[in-house]
Amino acid sequence: MNTPYDLNYDPPAPILTAVLTGVIHRRPQVRLPALIDTGSDLTAIPGTAVKRLRLYAVGRLLVEGIDAQVSITEIFTVRLTITDQPVREMEVVQTEQPFVILGRDWLEHYYLLLNGPERNFLLSDTPLYRHNES
């Protein structure tokens, strides 16, 4: 199924809805927009979600941000659900953005086709096309 880009972003972006819960307690849940970011190594969730879910750090990681600054950040474990996809337990970092950033650590489980000219995308857990080997 083709999903339209969210036109509230400039430029329009591939956005899904994420439902986050803790790994021990399934309540509360936090529902947030989630940007598919093929340039991000890691999945990140807003600091407000970390507080609301009462997550605790399970480790630390040295990261380089988009501004090329290196810093140590905390790692949290969450259960992440996207629409009809399976629930994934993931290690995530915190972001100051008000939305989830779905990085390549999440995306590696899916096939993604971005159609920029028509402003839509296709996400699937099965191959989107067959490659002819001739």
Image (cartoon, rainbow, N blue to C red):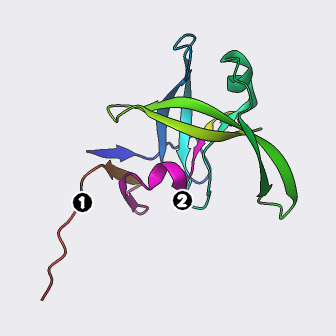
- Asked if residue 111 is among those painted magenta in the image, a careful observer would answer yes
Numbered range of the magenta stretch? 101-118
Look at label 2 and name its amino acid. Answer: Thr
- Which residue does the numbered mark 2 point to in the structure image? 38
Labels 2 & 1 near each other (Cβ < 8 A): no
* Residue 128: mark in rendering: 1
Residue farthest along the top direction in this orientation: 27
Residue sitting at x 55%, y 23%: 23
Front one among 17 and 95: 95
Q: Position of residue 33 (x, y in %)?
A: 55, 33
Mark 1: few/some/many CA within 10 Å (<14, 14-19, 20+) = few
Look at label 1 and name its amino acid. Answer: Leu
Mark 2: few/some/many CA within 10 Å (<14, 14-19, 20+) = some
For marks 2 and 1, give the CA distance: 17 Å
Quadrant housing residue 27: top right
Front one among 34 and 119: 34
Which type of secondary structure does the marked residue at label 1 adopt? loop
Q: Is residue 49 left or right of residue 110?
A: right
Quadrant housing residue 91: top right
Q: Is residue 20 left or right of residue 76?
A: left
